[in-house]
Structure formats: structure tokens, C-alpha cells
Amino acid sequence: MTTYDLEEDEEERVKELDLDSEADEKSIVRAKRRLRPGMRSEELFNWPIEEYWKKQGLLANQEYIQEMIRKNPKNVVDILALPKYQDNTFTDKMQWLYEHFRQFFTDISQFLVHLQHDKGNIYVIKINKTIQVCNKRNCPKMQATEKFRYRCAAHAKPKDCSAMSYAVHTIDDFSKKFQNKKEFPSRYGNKISQESMKQFNECARRVYRIFAHAYHHHEEEFTKYEDEYWLCSRFITFVYMYKLIPISHLEAEAQIPPKALLKLSTKEWAHKVGDVVTAKNYNDENT
């Protein structure tokens, strides 16, 4: 497939549009923010981040979150912080948390593929080092160190699963739960009730264990992935920013040491969560 000059293509599309109304100007902006056949890899998503308040529709939160991650995955505070509208009010917090969880499901799925390497091998030999693959033979039980072992709650009755099955079952289980129209009726507006926070809390606790297993049993692969995508750092910051797991409960889990994560100060996000009381309480506990 031959490539074409993106700028020339955009100019041609702009000429076809009538500039007599504000609606047409918005159409031009949308025309410039599309992926088209023949685009080069360096051109993909190569446009400035659109201000949050300009976005519209069901996928506004998702689009903004993904744009922020593509721009700089290391900038986890700005990725996670509640965005504001023109009148300086925050977007709906529950809706924002919901979209972040959906994004984490996608990103963690890619991380699990990374941990599996080649499914046909028990070990992968790389640069004269033996790297353990996360599969049923190597990790038959879900654990984080020898001290913490977990049963998979994605079944009618919790049961033992391999670490990889536990991770996949957890992501699949909450992906289904988050499609429940009773608790999550819409991806737009402020229709998710505060009662759904219980689902967020439970999901955060079980997802944390996936990262804890990866760090303690596949540290080299964990570190390699983290240094590029900062996924665990983003998730841990997400948990702290929005108090999704009580600190006492988090301290009772297998610990992922700070040295393995992006170093952040609570001062960087204390006033960006749309909930000053929550931010202040967390800072008081960690000063």
C-alpha cells in the first residue's frame, strides 16, 4: 500500500468543508484527528491532545485517557487527575474511575502477554539468562512470595488457579461486571452511583495481587515492562489518589517496594482528585 502526504490530504478535506458555521469548524478538527489507510507508523495518533472540555460523546473520557498515556506514560499524575471543564468544575468522579478501570483491563491484558513469552516453552533463554515464563507449570498457584497465596474468586466458589489463570479470570470477571447496566448504566454523564465504589474497591484489591505476583516471581520482566510503560506505577498511584484500597489493607498485602516504581510525592496530586478532603486525609496519614 502506498503512503500519501498527510498534510496534503488534510488540506483537500478542509477544502471540501464549508466554513460558514461553528459546526463545520468542529468537523474539520475531527477530520484531522483520524487514522486513515496508508498512514505511516510515525503519523499514527500524531496530533496535539485536545482539551478535555472540548470533547463530546460517550467515549470522551476514554479518548482523553488514551491520548494522555500515548503522550507520556510516565506522567501518571496528569493521566489520572480529574479533568476540569471551562467553568473550573471537575468531571464526574465515578465515571472517571470507571473509564480508568476499563483502560487498565486493556493495558494489563497486554502486560500478561508479555509475562507469558512463548507459551510452548517453560523457559526463555535470553542474553545468557534464564527467564521464567508465567504459565501453569512454573506458577501453578497464585501467590506473591511464599507467604501470600490467593484463591480465584471469579468462580461460583473460590478455587485454586494458576497465577496466569487467576489474572485472566480476574480481568474477565470484572470486565463482565462493569458491563452490568444496573450498576453501570452509561459511559456518559453522572449515572454511576456511589454504591458501585464497592466494585471498584474489590477490583483494585485483586488487580494489585496480579502486579505483586509479577514483581516477586518475574521481577526482571516486570522491571523491563515497567521501565517502558509505567503501568504498575500508574495503577498504584490510582489506588492511592482515590483511596481504592484502605492503607491498612494495602500494607497487609505482599509489598511492591518503592524502588520498583516511579517515585512520586503526594504533593504532586493532592489537589487534583476533585476531593480535597480525601487528599488531605491521605497526606495526614503519610507525613
Image: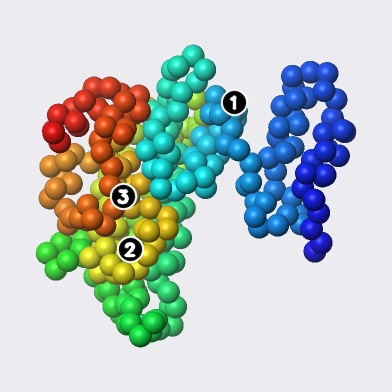
Q: Which mark is residue 54?
A: 1
Q: Could you tell me if the residues under marks 3 and 1 are in contact, i.e. CB atoms within 8 Å?
A: no
Q: What residue do we see at 46% from left, 60% from top?
A: 110
Q: Amino acid at mark 1?
A: Lys
Q: What residue do we see at 26% from left, 74% from top?
A: 140
Earlier sequence position, callout 3 versus callout 1: 1
x, y percent for residue 145: 17, 66
What residue is disc 3 on? Answer: 262
Residue found farthest to the top = 87
Q: Quadrant of residue 132?
A: bottom left
x, y percent for residue 183: 40, 34
Q: Quadrant of residue 136?
A: bottom left
For the residues carrying marks 3 and 1, which lies nearer the camera in this image? 3
Q: Which mark is residue 223?
A: 2
Could one spot residue 8 in this view of the protein? Answer: yes
Q: Secondary structure at mark 2?
A: helix
Q: Which mark is residue 20?
A: none
